[in-house]
Image (spheres, rainbow, N blue to C red):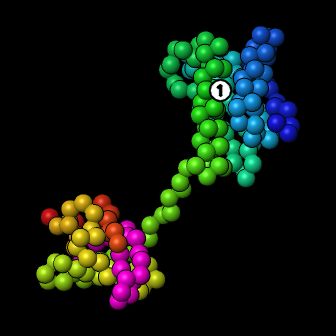
Amino acid sequence: MQTPARIEFENLAPTSELQAAIDQHISDLEKRYGRATAGRVIVRGPRDCHKTGGQYQVSIRLALPEGREVDVGRTPKEDERYADLTFAVDDAFKRARRQLQDQARLMNGQTKVHEEQPVGTVLRIDPSGEFGFLAAADGHEIYFNCHSVLENRANIAVGAHVSYHEEMGEKGPQASTVRVLSGHGMRA
């Protein structure tokens, strides 16, 4: 890390063993991923046994390049395993490791970030039911063939809201895939 991780304890006296375990977890994350620029770990002792059931809470925040972060905070309610401090610390770092793996994949371009598909409205459908036209958000018309409608073609109707993938066809814009958005324009 560019800045050493801050480790704080609330309602709990830190022990050298606990400090060493947290330092080891941080070191393991750094060795494996080496992307965190700063970090903060807060270990909270049980406050009110009636409300939390005597559970320990461990929060971890790691700042990553490109404005990304890992944020582990909530402890599952009514899980008696969190009454064990070692379990609470190990579980929080396990969740942080999973988030860090996901962020590392995104930063390395290994995970596709799907572009949101545009949404349009079915303007008209040919009486034969073989093709129709959509109105895009900007108002231009897009041709679609009944074979480009995903799932049940019988559910598409004039006025239905759909998502689609647009491409340029021989005679202008056409939708290569059309998906009826649930609850919109469905026939009875």
Is residue 75 shown in magenta?
no
**Residue at x 64%, y 32% (from the top left corner):** 96
Q: Is 130 displayed left or right of 42 in the figure?
A: left
Is residue 188 shown above or below 103?
A: below
Question: Which residue lies most toward the front here?
Answer: 170
> Residue 129: x percent and y percent?
16, 78
**In terms of image quadrants, where is residue 7?**
top right
| Picture quarter with the N terminus | top right
Residue at 38 percent across and 70 percent down: it is 164
Percent x, y for residue 173?
39, 83
Which residue is more in the foreground, 167 or 22? 167
Q: Which residue is mark 1?
A: 93
Number of numbered labels in the structure image? 1
Q: Is residue 51 left or right of residue 67?
A: left
Up/down of 116 relative to 57, above or below: below
Q: Which residues are magenta?
A: 158-175
State the image quarter where residue 81 is shown.
top right
Residue 182 visible in rendering: yes
The answer to whether residue 64 is above or below residue 32 is below
